[in-house]
Structure formats: structure tokens, C-alpha cells
Image: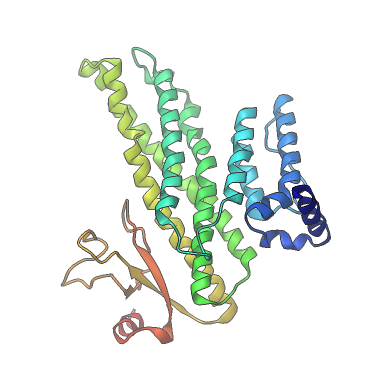
């Protein structure tokens, strides 16, 4: 029965390739899995021949966001195992239920997914760093490529989750407003934003790590540390705490950027203006940055008039609501009009 369904789906896709972007979950994967398998095989062949895994492929039936993810994973794949694992991860991303329109978005699960891949990658990078340093440690043993390109391998696993979060919140915003937009444009925005922003934040991460490691390693000699003590000190730059901070902050950023992408397309297509409203948890856990006390105006449920959106700081979990100008309450309307 499964083969009959699969064959029927393939035939439908051949006749009407435009339906592919509208398929979800397992149906989406079944529609393009054969093409992706061929792409994977071509990449493996190139690697065996001593060529880069990144290769061109006929992508007529592969949605642009998926093609972008494939190109990114192949760009940094250095072994057949990495290619294989990349396509396995891709299947999981495509087939898993999207926590969006069909229900309340599971924000905690999105954060956990991102934290897991960051934590695993950081631990791997720490292991490599310690091997490079040697005993006694010598920063000169660490290859230049480790600091310049190590972040790119982390981007390969982070970027798909950022895209998923971005699109989930964009869908949720569309469901709440009830007005559709050209979704291909939102998809393109998601891919471009995740790629560009991933480059920025992960390069910054490795730059800050380099500074910390460069300051810490000399203390091995100055303080008379053992190799175990040095490893313990270096863990702060590769720790689960750091992974969690990045995951929370960047989940917030991806969520807000996804909503902003939907609103931008809505405003462009309808000419109707939407107003961003800052939302905090509005409880005693909200920090002074996100909800300043008088004489400053508290941010909660007030229009964003300065162009600054969440996250306002590391671990910020604030959000944004969107209202048409005609639905603002009197206090919000006065503040919005006085911007």
C-alpha cells in the first residue's frame, strides 16, 4: 500500500510540480526523497574522487529552502559520514510536525533542539582544541583553519533549526491575522536570513572563544595548572550554559524575524500597516531592560517605536504582537502616532 501511495504521489508531482512547496511532513519528504538520494550519491562520488562534496544538481522539484539546506550541509561536509548524517537530519526536519498553525508553538522544544546541536558541536570543538594544544599546551599547535572555519561546521547544524523556527512563527502570525501572502517570498527570506545571521553570530562566537582561549592557556604555566585543570577552565567557552544562552537568544530572534517577514509581505501586498507591540512575561522575572520602571515607560504591550526588536539581551524571551493601526487601544495609538 505504501508503494502505491508513493507512486501516486510521484506521478502527481511529475504532472504538477508546483504542488511540492505546499506538501508537508512525510508527504513532502516522499515527493523529493528520490531526487535528494541522487544528489547525496553525486556528492559522495565527488568526495571519493577527491573533489568537494558541494555539487550542482537538477533542483526543479526541490523547494528552494530545502535546496539551500542541502548546499549548506555539502559545503562543509568533509567525509561520507557527514554527508549521510546531514541528509538524515534533513529528513527529520522535513518530516517532523511543524509546531505552528495547527497548535500552539512549543517554544521550549525549539530551544531544546537548538541547544542540543550547539552543545554537541561545542563539545566536539573543545575535544579538537585540546588535542591540538597538546601537553604541555601550545597555542601555536592550533591550526589557523580551526579558528577561521570551525564556526562554519556549527552553522551547518544550526541553520536548518533557525529556518524552521522562523517559518513556524511566520505561519503562526499568518494564521492569527488571517490574511495570506506569497509564501515563496517568505521562504526565501528565511533562507537568506538564517544564512547571513548564522554567519554573523557563529563567527562572533568563535572570535570571542579565541580571545578567551588565548588568555586562558598562558595561565597553565603562570598558575602551575595540570592539563586537567586547564581543560576545566577552557570548558567555560564550550559549556552547556553557553549553548543554552545562545539557543534561547537566537530562538527569540528567529521567531521575531519570521513574524516580521510575514508582516512585511502583508504590508507590501495589501498596503495595510501593522504595528509591532512588545510583549514580556509581565511578571517579577522580567528584567529592567525589557520592562523598565518609571520614570521610563514600561515596554509591555506598548508599540515598538525605536526599531529595536527582541531579543534585547542574552537569554531574552520576549515576543511581539502585531495589530493593525485601527485596532490599537488609546494609549498605544498616542504612543505610535508620536513616534
Query: Against 86, is 290 above or below?
Result: below
- Where residue 225 sits, quadrant-wise, is top left
Q: How many marks?
A: 0
Query: Against 16, is 149 above or below?
Result: above
Residue that lies at the very extreme toward the top in this rendered image: 136
Residue that lies at the very extreme toward the left in this rendered image: 295
* Colour scheme in use: rainbow
Q: Residue at (40%, 27%) from the top-left corner?
A: 126
Q: Residue at (52%, 36%) from the top-left corner?
A: 153
Q: Position of residue 180 (x, y in %)?
A: 59, 74
Image position of 201 (left or right of 192): left
- Where residue 222 sits, quadrant-wise, is top left
Q: Nearer the viewer, residue 121 or 112?
A: 112
Q: Position of residue 229 (x, y in %)?
A: 26, 20
- Where residue 324 sits, quadrant-wise, is bottom left
Does the image show residue 308?
no
Query: Against 75, is 181 above or below?
Result: below
Q: Nearer the viewer, residue 157 or 5?
A: 5
Image position of 33 (left or right of 163): right
Q: Position of residue 325 (x, y in %)?
A: 42, 83
Q: Residue at (16%, 72%) from the top-left corner?
A: 295
Does the image show residue 254?
yes
- In what quadrant of the picture does the C terminus appear? bottom left
Query: Against 314, is 169 above or below?
Result: below
Amino acid at each position: 500500500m505504501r508503494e502505491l501511495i508513493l507512486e501516486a504521489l510521484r506521478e502527481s508531482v511529475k504532472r504538477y510540480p508546483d504542488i511540492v512547496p505546499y506538501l508537508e511532513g512525510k508527504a513532502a519528504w516522499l515527493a523529493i526523497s528520490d531526487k535528494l538520494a541522487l544528489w547525496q550519491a553525486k556528492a559522495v562520488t565527488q568526495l571519493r574522487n577527491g573533489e568537494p562534496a558541494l555539487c550542482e544538481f537538477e533542483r526543479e522539484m526541490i523547494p528552494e529552502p530545502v535546496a539551500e539546506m542541502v548546499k549548506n550541509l555539502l559545503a562543509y561536509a568533509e567525509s561520507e559520514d557527514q554527508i549521510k548524517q546531514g541528509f538524515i537530519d534533513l529528513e527529520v526536519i522535513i518530516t517532523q510536525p511543524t509546531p505552528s498553525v495547527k497548535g500552539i508553538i512549543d517554544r521550549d522544544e525549539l530551544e531544546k533542539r537548538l541547544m542540543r546541536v550547539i552543545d554537541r558541536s561545542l563539545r566536539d570543538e573543545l575535544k579538537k582544541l585540546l588535542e591540538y594544544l597538546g601537553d604541555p599546551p601550545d597555542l601555536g599547535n592550533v591550526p589557523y583553519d580551526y579558528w577561521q572555519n570551525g564556526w562554519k561546521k556549527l552553522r551547518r547544524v544550526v541553520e536548518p533549526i533557525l529556518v524552521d523556527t522562523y517559518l513556524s512563527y511566520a505561519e503562526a502570525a499568518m494564521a492569527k491575522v488571517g490574511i495570506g501572502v506569497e509564501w515563496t517570498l517568505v521562504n526565501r527570506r528565511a533562507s537568506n536570513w538564517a544564512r547571513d545571521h548564522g554567519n554573523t553570530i557563529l563567527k562572533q562566537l568563535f572570535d570571542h572563544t579565541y580571545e578567551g582561549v588565548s588568555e586562558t592557556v598562558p595561565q597553565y604555566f603562570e598558575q602551575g595548572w595540570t592539563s586537567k585543570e586547564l581543560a576545566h577552565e577552557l570548558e567555560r567557552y564550550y559549556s552547556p550554559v553557553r549553548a543554552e544562552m545562545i539557543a534561547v537568544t537566537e530562538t527569540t530572534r528567529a521567531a521575531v524575524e519570521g513574524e516580521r517577514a510575514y508582516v512585511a509581505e502583508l504590508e507590501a501586498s495589501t498596503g495595510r500597516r501593522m504595528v509591532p507591540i512588545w510583549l514580556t512575561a509581565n511578571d517579577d522575572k522580567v528584567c529592567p531592560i525589557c520592562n523598565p520602571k518609571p520614570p521610563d515607560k514600561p515596554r509591555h504591550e506598548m508599540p515598538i517605536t525605536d526599531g529595536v526588536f527582541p531579543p534585547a539581551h542574552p537569554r531574552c524571551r520576549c515576543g511581539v504582537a502585531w495589530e493593525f493601526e485601527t485596532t490599537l487601544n488609546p494609549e498605544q495609538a498616542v504612543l505610535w502616532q508620536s513616534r
